Image (cartoon, coloured by chain):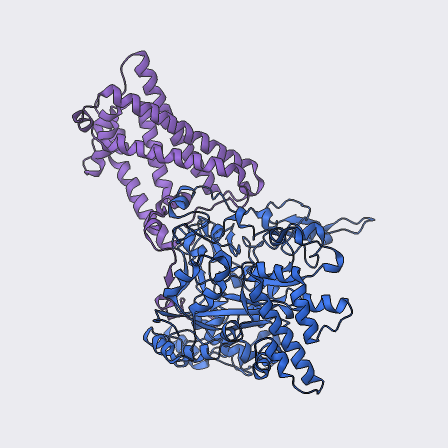
Amino acid sequence: MAGRIGKVMAQVAMVMNLDKCIGCHTCSVTCKQAWTNRSGVEYAWFNNVETRPGQGYPRRHEDQERWQGGWKRTAAGRLKPRAGGRLKKLATIFANPKMPAIQDYYEPWTYDYEHLITAPLGDDIPGARPRSLITGEPMQIKWSANWDDDLAGGEELASRDPIVQKIGDKVRFEYEQSFMFYLPRICEHCLNPSCVASCPSGAMYKRAEDGIVLVDQDKCRGWRMCVTGCPYKKVYFNHKTGKAEKCTLCYPRVEVGLPTVCSETCVGRLRYLGVVLYDVERVGKAAAVKDEKDLYEAQLDVFLDPDDPDVQAAAIRDGIPERWLDSARRSPVFKLAKHFKVALPLHPEYRTMPMVWYIPPLSPVVDALSETGHDGEDASNLFAAIDTLRIPVEYLAELFTAGDPAPVKRVLAKLAAMRAYMRRINLGQEKDESIAQSAGMTGEEIESMYRLLAIAKYEDRYVIPTAYGVDEADRGVIEEIGCSLDFEGGPGMGGMGGNVPFGEASGRPEAATVETFHALRDRQTSDGHSGPTRRFNLLNWDGNGRPPGLFPDRDRQDENEEAK
Amino acid sequence: MNPTALDYMLWGALPYVVLAVLIGGTIWRYRYDRFGWTTRSSQLYESRILRIASPVFHFGLLVVIIGHVVGLLIPETWTDAVGITNDMYHVTALSLGAIAGVTTLGGITLLIWRRRTTGPVFSATTANDKVMYLVLVAAIVAGLATTLFSAVAGLTSGEEVDYRETVSPWFRSIFLLQPDVPAMSAATTPFQLHALIGLALFALFPFTRLVHAFSAPIWYLFRPYVVYRSRENQPTQPTRPIRRGWT
């Protein structure tokens, strides 16, 4: 460990293994059901899956010449939001000059289902026409969040991909050379968040305990600068409430040790969640290194090794609980990013120090090999292909390492070595240490990496400590109150807090607290009843007898009667 | 001319009612409706017209506000003392005021036209917004009218209506808790009308989207870029009283 350790902070971070993504959008759909199935954010997908090469969502969001997201390094070596510093932000506050319009995302719509049952009897079968959720008028659907799904590589769409344009004329989308992969994206919960830096109200913040970046809905005044500030375009403006909303990393779940909804429901089990310790005092300097290509290494240097006794002492000094340290030592994210060095940050050149990392896909290389009739699992074939297949490698480098192909090649070589090494084991052949060595690893390391990437169980993929101050002692103390939205007039009961004078967007929203989730987790993870209140589910009632929980306790009821 | 009972009501009592509503209403709104406290921006729907109209309106309005502060708060004796003649003062005030006023009016006209003609923006307009726009436009128009009347009167008869001897002393006297009703009742009708509409606007202020003006984020200039917050500050108890399932 070089140098003094500054203030230690913990971050709940994610790694996604892109080779495993089948592009099923289950993460997007479950996320939408959990967080954005409300009016005002119909167009917002906190989690979306893009087909690459492709334009992404919102369209061409990676074109920072146009959208001005992220940070810019000034000549003096300091960082400044690319869209302008504090004075410029305030000077342009009356109309944000760099904000995507709804058409850059897509115009959300519904279908005129009612027409199906109210149409008069006639010769034609009635249809449900699409209707805009913005204007309410009939509309023609021309684009959506995943319109170019699976169409990557096609000349028409992929040639408008900002990365393809950056690589330039080297990329020709001929059929034999085409490749594609899926890129699921959520908020990066950056160490140096430019959305937070752009918020004039100070409503956006990074949580000190777990690094989750959130919007304080009571403090947001709708200035929209965060939408511009985020280079990943992962802060959305709710056009009904006039407030910014974003991926919360499912903090109510993470606080009780459950993985995010997108991770939990991922069909390919490609997501990993874990704690990364970092030195917050090194972040500013690391994000401002001169050469963009050094940003990946600079960010790795900010991470602290939880097995280092000095780091442990510094963490305890800075108030990080023992169980967080323990969790950090078992963190799959730390292992993949720093130990095996197979995970890479998405667009480090934005200088935000993103904390959702990706294991780049080897599949474009394997596919290209197999299509030419070569053995796609043979080590020497794979290594040769990684060196010669310039285009996928350069494309991945533009995504993950600011255009430097060397780290991408190293990662792909490790993945290729793992593939070839493990095949020999599966086929009952002798272990070939030389395969491991050619990727700079040992056979033992490869097997350990293989366990983490291929067979890691739920507890190995999601290593999440419960939030500070909510330890085991709190469990069961707080009564379960059922669904936290099911109070009188609440959203669960069909209202938005009842009648309020300033329309549906006003009034005080109900806070989602970790305390209610403790009870919910008990209920979700236990086989029988849990929590002090045992309510009877009327859906299963056959009408006979008086099952426990159907009525309140007789004693308490009698007490109430007497009180009257 | 002696002030009538109506004058006392309008210029002696009403300002305090409006002040109470403005201050009390703002506190109430802040406590009750922090979530509804926003600019309610419609930029996501339409950006092209907004990008011109909104800055024109807001910057115009800022100049108008500065003009009002100078005209109402700085006594005539002070400007006399630094050697600014009455003519100099009025020519500057009227010309600057006219430019700022016309800019503001032009901006808001464009904004309202956009609001009416752009489908999504119109459907996001509430009754509350419509009332607010009406009063706001009335205040701007009446204000411009006073400017015009003053200029015309100054040009034709050479006798300028000097609001600095009527409206301004009255305005200052409100805050000294000794409302100078005679001064205000001596003002001409356009000035009185403008003042009344202004009072209506202040009374409406806390209950409309105008509250976003109170959260002008000036302190952004002085804070570090990245904000950290601890979840320790959050309540550790459920936010609602726990009720039994069947009550």
Is residue B125 or residue A263 the one in the foreground? Answer: A263
Residue B20 quadrant: top left
Compared across the picture, whether A17 is left or right of A229 comes to right
Quadrant of the frame with the C terminus of chain A? bottom left
How far across and how far down the image is residue B225, in percent? Answer: 38, 55
Residue A264 visible? The answer is yes
Which residue occupies 74% across, 49% down? A119
How far across and how far down the image is residue A128, in percent? Answer: 72, 52
Residue A430's place in the image compared with B212, above or below, is below
How far across and how far down the image is residue A492, in percent? Answer: 53, 63
Residue A440 quadrant: bottom right
What is the drawing colour of chain A? blue
Which residue occupies 67% across, 64% down? A388
Quadrant of the frame with the N terminus of chain A? bottom left
Residue A111 visible? The answer is no
How far across and how far down the image is residue A302, in percent? Answer: 42, 68
Is residue A74 or residue A352 the one in the foreground? Answer: A74
Which residue occupies 54% across, 38% down? B48
Is residue B74 or residue B168 the one in the foreground? Answer: B74
Q: Farthest residue toward the top?
A: B157
Compared across the picture, whether B236 is left or right of A365 comes to left
Compared across the picture, whether A153 is left or right of B149 comes to right
Residue A375's place in the image compared with A499, above or below, is below
Chain appearing in purple on the rendered image: B
Residue A68's place in the image compared with A37, above or below, is above
Compared across the picture, whether A249 is left or right of A24 comes to left
Which residue occupies 21% across, 30% down? B169
